[in-house]
Amino acid sequence: MAVAQEKRTYPYIPTKNWWDLRRRFMNRPPSKIDAEYLQALLGVENERSAGNIIGPLKTVGLIDDDGKPTDIAFDWASNEHYKDACQRILDNVYGVELQETFPEPELDKQAIANWFKRRTRKGTSVTNRMAMFYILIRQGDPTVQEQAPVGPSSRAPRTKRAQPSPIALSSAAPQPPVESVLTPTTVHEVRNESMQSQPLPMPAVHIDLQIHISAEASAEQIDRVFASMAKHLYGRSAE
């Protein structure tokens, strides 16, 4: 009969929380860490969420069962002893198997996450976070803190946008780009400038005349008809 593999769990602390808490330790180590303290320091949404970090802090050995900082925590807050503190966490929490399976500098996040998945039977998102935290400790580099953002890790509250009414949405016409909008005043100015810079062409008039002359008309009458046309249409006087 096959022996069931032992199911374990491993800690995870968000990277930003890790560095924010270490900054506080470096400046002024707390006498005790509880959910209320973490909520104020890390800016998490509520005390319950902050309490979820207490367990991992105990697992890695930064605080004891009463929430008081341990010797590892004070070494962890020292740049000189930070790497040694991380190595103690690796030995106490992860053992030698994981360290020997993935020796430095071959820290393949996906491979390490798969290692956690086989032993914890957890989902991908959880084991990915475990792998990220393990790599953070395995690096043992306190200078990474200098690149980490400072301040509460909680997200800024989202501002609710005013929703337009259905009537406004249905009646709203597409708006042209700002640069293409011309006010009436602008149109008037453009027209004036165009009229001043270019002379307006004279309108062309085309007139067709049909003249019916009776066959009984005399030559004198015909001459009078054409003379009248020349006078009234072309402004010419009869010679």
Image (tube, helix red, strand yellow):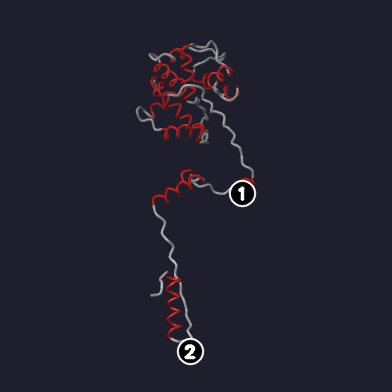
Instruction: Name the amino acid type tagged 1.
Output: Ser
Q: CA distance from mark 1 to mark 2?
A: 74 Å
Q: Quadrant of residue 235?
A: bottom left
Question: What residue is drawn where x is 53% and y is 21%?
Answer: 42
Residue 15 screen position, x and y as percent:
47, 25
Quadrant where the C terminus sits is bottom left
- Under circle 2, the secondary element is loop
Question: What residue is drawn where x is 48% and y is 15%?
Answer: 24
Q: Is residue 126 or residue 148 the one in the foreground?
A: 148
Residue 145 screen position, x and y as percent:
42, 21
Q: Is disc 1 in contact with disc 2, using a CB cutoff of under 8 Å? A: no
Residue farthest toward the bottom in the current orientation of the protein: 216
Closer to the chain start, of discs 1 and 2, is 1
Question: What residue is drawn where x is 52% and y is 30%?
Answer: 7
Residue farthest toward the left in the current orientation of the protein: 105
Question: Where is 94 relative to 235, above or below?
Answer: above
Q: Which residue has dot 1 on it? A: 171
Crowding at dot 1, Cα within 10 Å, few <14 / some 14-19 / many 20+, comes out as: few
Crowding at dot 2, Cα within 10 Å, few <14 / some 14-19 / many 20+, comes out as: few
Question: What residue is drawn where x is 42% and y is 16%?
Answer: 85
Instruction: Name the amino acid type tagged 2.
Output: Glu
Q: Which residue has dot 2 on it? A: 216
- Under circle 1, the secondary element is helix
Residue 238 screen position, x and y as percent:
40, 74
Q: Nearer the viewer, mark 1 or mark 2?
A: 2
Q: Is residue 205 or residue 187 the one in the foreground?
A: 205
Question: Where is 211 relative to 130, above or below?
Answer: below
Question: Where is 31 relative to 118, above or below?
Answer: above
